[in-house]
Image (spheres, rainbow, N blue to C red):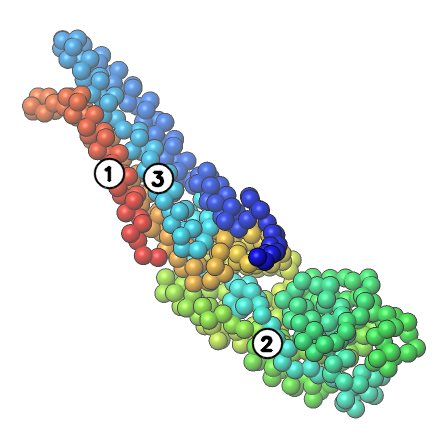
Amino acid sequence: DGALKVNVTKIGEETFLAGVMRLVEEAQASKSRLQMLSDRAAYYLTIIAIVTGGITLLAWLLSKATPSFALERFVAVVVIACPHALGLAVPLVAAISTTLAARHGFLVKQRLALEAARNIDVVLFDKTGTLTKGEYGVERIFNFFRFAESRNAGQFPISNDNEILRLAASVDSRSEHFIARAIVREAERKGLELARVEDFQRIPGKGVRGEIYSNILKNVGISDKEEIEIAVGGESLAIESRVSIPGEIQTKIDALSRQGKTVIYVIADGQLLGAIALADLMREESREAIHALKTMGVQIAMITGDSEGVAKWVAQELGIDEYFARVLPHEKSEKVKLLQSKGRRVAMVGDGINDAPALTQADLGIAIGAGTNVAIESAGIILVRNDPRDIPKIIRLSRFTYAKMMQNLFWATGYNVVALPLAAGVLTSQGILLQPALAALFMSLSTVVVAVNAVLLKKKEL
C-alpha cells in the first residue's frame, strides 16, 4: 500500500561482495615462489619418471630378463611416479590459505605477499586511521587576539572562537583529510555558515590554503580587503609561514601535544589568527595487536606527520618500540628504506594516498579496508574489518602455510625418491617386487596424503 524508495549506489561487479570474490580469485590465480618451484619440480619429475622407466626397461632387457617382465617394470616406474602429489603440494595449501584468510577478515591480493609475511620482523604503522580511528574531535580553540602579545604583533581582530573555527572550516571543506573533516563537522554542529573558497591548494604533509572573500571577512571585522589567503595546517606549516606563537599559548600547546592532542594553526596572510586542538580516538584493538606482535618476536614502529610530542605520547601509550614524527608524505617510503637498509624485513600498514609509496616499498604492504583506493591497490593484503588485530593473524597464517607447503614438498619428494627405485626392481633379489597395480595404489595414496595434510591447515587457530 506504500512506496519504497531505494538508492542503489553500486550494482553487480561493483558491490563489496563482488570485490571480495574478485580479489580472492585473483589471489588464487597468482603464484608464490614455492608454488612456482613446485610446478617446475612436477615438470622435471615427469621427465625423470619417463627417462627412469626407459632406463629400467633397457637395463632389464640387457640383463636377459623376459620382455614382459622388463615392460612390467617400465609400467610400474611410470605409474608409481607421482607428479600429482608434487604438483598439488603447494597450490592446494595456497588455495586453502587464501580462503582461510578471507574468512578471518583479510584479503590476500598477492600470494607473494602472504609468503613474505612469515619473515617480517618489524611492522611500521601509520598512526592516523590505523592505530587510531581517525575520528578527530575539536577539544579547544585558541584565539590569539585575546593576548596582548598578539595584539602588539598586529594580528587580525577576530572577535570570538567561532570565527576562528569558521575560517578554518571554510578552507578545510575542500579537503578530505581526517582532521579537516573533523573541523568541518564541528563548524556544522555549531551551525556556522562556511564561506566560498577560491584557489584551494593542498600542501602535502603540512595542510591546506585558499582564498576567502568578503562575505565572511565583514563578520570578523576585516573590511579593508576583498580577499585574504587563509592557511590551515600543523606545526610544519606554522614554521614555514614564520609565524610567532604567544608564549602563554605555546606552553598550553606543548602540554596538549604531550597528551597526544593534534594542534592545527589558522594563518591569515602570514599572520597567526588562532589554533584548534583536536583529539583522535585510539583504537581499542591497537594495544592487543601490538602485544600479540611483540609476543611473536616482531618489533613495532610508528610513522606520523604529527609533532614529536604527539608521536611520543602515542608510542608510550601503546608500547611502540620506535617512531618517526613530522614525516612528510614523500618521506614515508624513505623511512621504510631506512629500516630495510638495516637488514630488517618491513611490513607497512596504512590507509591513505600518502601511504601508497611506502606500501609499495615495504616487503609487505597491508592496507586498511576503509582506506583510499590508491592505498588498497598498492598493498598485497587488505584488512577488510579495519582491525589491527588481524595483522598477527596474517603472520601466523603465513607461517602455518609455509610449514604445510614444506611438509607436502618433503613428502612428495621423499615418496618419489623411495618409490622409483622400488618400482624399477632394485630389491628384486630380496624378494621385494612392486606390481603395476600396487604401484598405482601407492601413487593414489601419496596424492591423498598431500591433500589431507593441506586440509588440516583449516584446523589451525589464528
- Residue, far bottom: 148
Question: Looking at the rendering, in which quadrant would you find the N terminus?
Answer: bottom right
Question: Looking at the rendering, in which quadrant would you find the C terminus?
Answer: bottom left
Q: Earlier in the sequence, mark 1 or mark 2?
A: 2
Q: Earlier in the sequence, mark 3 or mark 2?
A: 3
Task: Please provide percent x and percent y for residue 364.
Answer: 49, 52
- Secondary structure at badge 2 equals strand
Task: Give left or right: position of 1 versus 462.
Answer: right
Tell me which residue sits at (19%, 25%) in the image.
439
Q: Which residue is mark 2?
A: 279
Q: Is there any visible trace of residue 410 in the rendered image?
A: no
Mark 2 is surrounded, within 10 Å at the Cα level, by few (under 14), some (14 to 19) or many (20 or more) other residues, namely many
Q: CA distance from mark 3 to mark 2?
A: 47 Å
Residue 449: give its label: 1
Task: Give left or right: position of 453 versus 239.
Answer: left
202 to 309, vertically: above or below:
above
Q: CA distance from mark 1 to mark 2?
A: 56 Å
| Amino acid type, residue under disc 3 in the picture | Leu
| Amino acid type, residue under disc 1 in the picture | Val
- The quadrant where residue 13 appears: top right
Task: Give left or right: position of 56 versus 248.
Answer: left
Residue 92: give its label: 3
Tell me which residue sits at (45%, 54%) in the image.
106
